[in-house]
Image: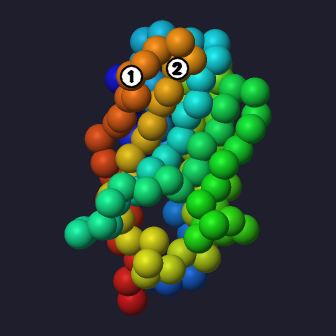
Amino acid sequence: QLQASGGGLVQPGASLGLSCAASGAISSRNIMGWYRQAPGKQRELVATLSTAGATNYADSVKGRFTISRDNVKKTVYLQMNRLKPEDTAAYYCYLMRYGDPRDYWGQGTQVTVSS
């Protein structure tokens, strides 16, 4: 189970942090991360981070967003800086465990960037 938190309403240029805590066994080898979905659009990758430390960012967030994780706490974080209105979306936490064909999703947390 994935529990996300930290969304909210901010002005353009502001910063916001998201966190997502996993419960239960998540495997010693996994990928955790974030996707987002804006109204009327498909869900898209934001950033992922593997247990080995490999990161993957969407081009639209490179240089502004930073993903990190605490493997002991089984928690992944997303620090979002210089937010833009186009970052407005529901953000979903993601977990993929090596050897498990299923993808796991948390509930969405809304991020709204508006003046």
Q: In which quarter of the image is residue 55?
A: top right
Alpha-carbon neighbours of circle 1 within 10 Å: few (<14), some, or many (≥20)? few
Marks 1 and 2 close (CB-CB < 8 Å)? yes
Residue pushed farthest bottom?
A: 115
Residue type at tag 2? Arg
Which SS class for mark 2?
strand
Q: Which residue is drawn at 53% across and 12% down?
A: 99
Q: In this view, does 90 lie above or below 27?
A: below
Q: Residue at label 2?
A: 97
Looking at the rendered structure, which numbered label has been put on residue 3? none
User: In this orientation, which residue lies closer to the viewer: 55 or 67?
Assistant: 55
**Image quarter of the N terminus:** top left
Q: In this view, does 90 lie above or below 23?
A: below
Q: Is residue 84 left or right of residue 9?
A: right
Q: Quadrant of residue 52?
A: top right
Q: Residue at label 1?
A: 102
Q: Residue at x 43, y 12 (%)?
A: 24
Q: In this view, does 26 lie above or below 51?
A: above
Q: In this view, does 59 lie to the left or right of 109?
A: right
